[in-house]
Image (cartoon, helix red, strand yellow):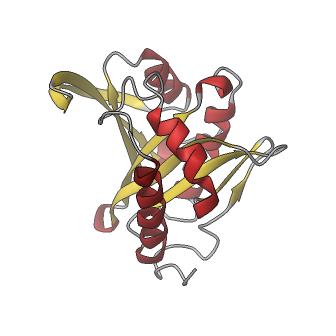
Amino acid sequence: MTAAPAWLPRDAFTLTGARVALRPLDRDDAAALFALYADPEVMRYWNHAPWTSIDQARAAIIDARADYRTGASLHYAIAHQDTGELIGCCALYAFARQHRCASVGYMLAKAHRGHGYLREALALLLDHAFTACGLNRVEAEVSLHNTGSCRALARLGFRGEGCMRERWIVDGVRHDTVAYGLLRADWRGV
């Protein structure tokens, strides 16, 4: 992997917590990533339809690795510390360097929900965003009906900033979304 752009810290590629590690996606993750994005329940509130081919996972991994090099995004596998299994993914993307702002996205496999893994992973990512990456603001956008995700963001300190009506159209169905924001000054860690 080539060096990250100057604005990204050199250690931007692996973040380690007590029970999860955030690491770059690699070719060996294609099957697990496909299983995650192909699961209709996991994708229920996502902004696009579930994947239908493992080639979509392979292409996403290639894109993520290219984005690491250019600094366009930091897309991480959420790996279980004990097993190394990919249990989800998260990303910082849509960097607006002038404004020191980025968006966050995340998903977790059904079998690993309710154990605090997502909270730990996002805390690692947010610490990294506000310290090493020097961001002032992180944004999230979720389906209005995704109450679990809304609660998770609130527990991390995000504030709801408004509803965007019919923001996403997925398979012809219109979805309202809620915008969330978290400022560096408000981040207290977890």
Rendered image quadrant of residue 163: top left
Please name the residue shown 43% across and 25% down the image: 40
Q: Is residue 53 above or below residue 23?
A: above
Left or right, residue 47 beside residue 80: left
Residue 136 visible in the snapshot:
no
Question: Residue 63 at what x, y percent from top left?
Answer: 41, 64
Question: Residue 49 at what x, y percent from top left?
Answer: 31, 33
Quadrant location, the C terminus: top right
Quadrant location, the N terminus: bottom right
Please name the residue shown 34% across and 67% down the image: 97
Question: Residue 170 at what x, y percent from top left?
Answer: 22, 30
Relative depth, front residue between 108 and 178: 108
Q: Is residue 83 above or below residue 25?
A: above
Please name the residue shown 50% across and 56% down the image: 75
Q: Number of marks in the image? A: 0
Residue 48 visible in the snapshot:
yes
Please name the residue shown 37% across and 54% down the image: 102
Left or right, residue 11 beside residue 145: right
Name the residue at the right extreme.
82
Question: Residue 58 at what x, y percent from top left?
Answer: 47, 58
